Image (spheres, rainbow, N blue to C red):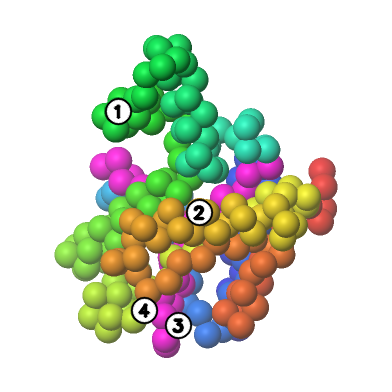
Amino acid sequence: MPTVLLEKTKTGILQFEFSDKWQVYKYDEQSKDNFYEKKLKNKSLKAVDFIAMSDKAVLFIEVKYITANDDACRMRLNKALDNEIIEKVSQEINDSKILSHLEKSRVAVTSKRPYLAEEVVNKYKDTLLGLLAADYKKDTKLAPYYKSVFVEKKPVILILFLERTEQLNQEQYFKPLASDLKLAIKQKTDFLCQDIDVINTLTAIQPLGIKVSNISRAHPT
């Protein structure tokens, strides 16, 4: 029987329907019985939204629903936006001066908006650490998942599900962004997972056996 889970965000509601080949856990669920909520959240560790397990693989799924355009978004969707800040600072300091690598790093650090790819990387790494902690504490609900990763060593796939507006979800807008984010995430996690993907409701991989619907878009309030 399929497993249906809702991911509610400030911008809308997404419905995830996992086929019966998947055993699914809402890792960041706000519940007193949830290991992350009870043991790890107050330790400043981050969490992905879902962990799904099949006979062949384990999925770590982080969900973002961003309707704002790239400039207005609270997060940076493109690392290149730092280049604009660097150029502006460079001109303010001295039009003829080229910033050193250290100065560029300082400018990047002062950027107020977090970079989406880095947030996904941190959530994934913290979730792996969370599973290790669950193993150490013998949490029964997470046992199938940490055993699949650490004992059975099933391939781990990291998925960023990035939903946007109907226009920005279209391939000509979404595909370049997805490619950039995938590369940025892969550079920091390829030694920790088998594969990485960035998808939305229009590009979800059907053979995986996961169907995603935008409930809020289908039934606007």
In the rendered image, residue 92, in percent from the top left (x then y), is placed at: 45, 12
Residue 100 has which mark?
A: 1
Q: Quadrant of residue 69?
A: top right
The residue beneath circle 2 is 181
Task: Rate crowding at label 2 as few (under 14), some (14 to 19) or many (20 or more) other CA atoms within 10 Å.
Answer: many
Between tags 1 and 2, which lies in front? 1
Q: Amino acid at mark 2?
A: Leu
In three-dimensional space, the C-alpha distance between marks 3 and 1, rounded to whole angstroms, equals 48 Å
The residue beneath circle 3 is 54
The residue beneath circle 4 is 155
Q: Amino acid at mark 4?
A: Pro
In three-dimensional space, the C-alpha distance between marks 2 and 3, rounded to whole angstroms, equals 26 Å
Find out whether residue 148 is within the magenta segment.
Answer: no
Q: Earlier in the sequence, mark 1 or mark 4?
A: 1
Q: Earlier in the sequence, mark 3 or mark 4?
A: 3
Quarter of the N terminus within the rendering = bottom right
In the rendered image, residue 158, in percent from the top left (x then y), is placed at: 44, 65
Quarter of the C terminus within the rendering = top right
- Provide the residue span drawn in magenta: 41-67
